[in-house]
Image (cartoon, rainbow, N blue to C red):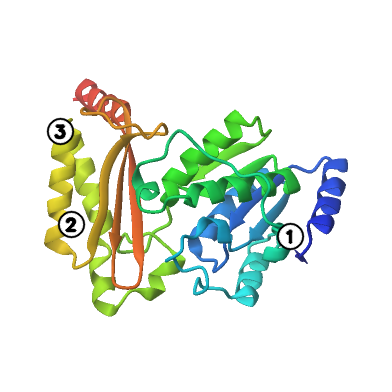
């Protein structure tokens, strides 16, 4: 495994890989690697000849009161994990390398925002768009891999690739969870002992919502009310949002008609946790029909 610090060297390597007809799988991260990131690498290895993983804590996607300076960083541990998983190149640019000057061009997004995490993190996804556009141009991947835990980010990356005509195939990888259902996250280490006991209720709430939909609930407002009450009864943290939206368009509908995302966010004392579940009504009804036909 080779560690790359500069854009120039990364481009030279990409040019070599392309010349040798290597399919490039790209896993963008902000470091502090855990099992969720490693699952992305495992997926990449199934179809890519060379794996490039980036580690870059992007200042543009942090707000004024967010945790850029305290965001967990451990390069040597990350390098060891990446090497063990068979990553070929780790691109680790400094902020000054990615943004040597004040930005002369910014990016905005008009769809799939105003909901979920974008409500409380204005400007966050503009920063994501900029850094991913730069990384996509530098690395020129054939495939890129994102975890479903950050479902709004995936929806926006999907839009970015489609509307800017990046020749990249987006792979959406299921969320990796602890045995108790808690989604793996670099921020989980900030939970207190009591909060660690409570945090799995986020996933339990999502599964409860899925059960209600399977049983016939189609009103998004009633579903949101039920899940909000479930969280209030089981958590000490402050509920940031409970939303039910179409996926991937992230539009609000009064009734569940097809594929939806249930998204949750809870602010604990030192960390904000998010989780979600994608539920396809068509698949639920097909399974129900299959059971009826086999009865």
Q: Position of residue 164 (x, y in %)?
A: 63, 32
Q: Are marks 3 and 2 in contact (CB under 8 Å)?
A: no
| Rendered view: 293 above or below 46 | above
What residue is at 66 percent from the left and 70 percent from the top? 79
For label 2, count other residues whose C-alpha is less than 10 Å away and answer few (under 14), some (14-19) or many (20+). Answer: many
Q: Position of residue 274 (x, y in %)?
A: 35, 56
Q: Position of residue 228 (x, y in %)?
A: 17, 51
What residue is at 35 percent from the left and 48 percent from the top? 119
Answer with the quarter of the image where residue 96 lies.
Answer: bottom right
What residue is at 39 percent from the left and 69 percent from the top? 188
**Residue receiving disc 1:** 100
Residue sitting at the far top: 293
- Mark 3 or 1, which is nearer the eye? 1
Q: Are marks 1 and 2 in contact (CB under 8 Å)?
A: no
Q: Quadrant of the C terminus?
A: top left
- Mark 1 or 2, which is nearer the eye? 1
* Secondary element type, mark 2: helix
For label 1, count other residues whose C-alpha is less than 10 Å away and answer few (under 14), some (14-19) or many (20+). Answer: few
* Secondary element type, mark 1: loop
Spatial CA distance of label 3 from label 1 is 52 Å
Answer with the quarter of the image where residue 78 lies.
Answer: bottom right
**Residue receiving disc 3:** 217
**Residue receiving disc 2:** 231
Spatial CA distance of label 3 from label 2 is 18 Å
Q: Front-most of 228 and 170? A: 228
Residue sitting at the far bottom: 193
| Rendered view: 14 above or below 237 | above
Residue 267 appears anywhere in the view: yes
């Amino acid at each position: 495994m080779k560690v790359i610090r500069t854009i120039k060297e990364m481009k030279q390597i990409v040019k070599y890989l392309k010349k040798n007809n290597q399919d490039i799988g790209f896993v963008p991260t902000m470091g502090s690697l855990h099992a969720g990131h490693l699952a992305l690498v495992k997926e990449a290895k199934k179809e890519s000849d060379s794996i490039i993983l980036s580690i870059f804590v992007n200042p543009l996607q942090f707000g004024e009161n967010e945790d850029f300076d305290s965001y967990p960083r451990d390069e040597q541990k990350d390098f060891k994990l990446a090497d063990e998983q068979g990553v070929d190149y780790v691109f680790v640019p400094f902020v000054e390398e990615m943004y040597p000057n004040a930005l002369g061009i910014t990016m905005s997004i008009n769809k799939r925002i105003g909901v979920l995490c974008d409500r409380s993190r204005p400007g966050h996804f503009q920063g994501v768009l900029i850094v991913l556009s730069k990384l996509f141009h530098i690395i020129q991947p054939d495939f890129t891999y994102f975890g479903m835990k950050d479902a709004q980010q995936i929806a926006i990356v999907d839009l970015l690739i489609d509307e800017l005509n990046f020749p990249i195939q987006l792979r959406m990888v299921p969320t990796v969870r602890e045995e108790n259902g808690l989604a793996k996250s670099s921020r989980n280490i900030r939970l207190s002992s009591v909060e660690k006991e409570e945090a799995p209720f986020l996933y339990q709430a999502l599964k409860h919502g899925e059960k209600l939909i399977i049983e016939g609930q189609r009103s998004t407002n009633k579903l949101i009310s039920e899940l909000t009450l479930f969280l209030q009864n089981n958590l000490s943290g402050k509920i940031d949002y409970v939303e039910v939206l179409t996926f991937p368009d992230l539009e609000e509908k009064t009734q569940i008609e097809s594929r939806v995302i249930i998204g949750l966010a809870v602010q604990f004392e030192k960390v904000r946790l998010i989780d979600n579940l994608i539920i396809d009504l068509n698949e639920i009804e097909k399974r129900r029909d299959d059971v009826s036909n086999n009865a």
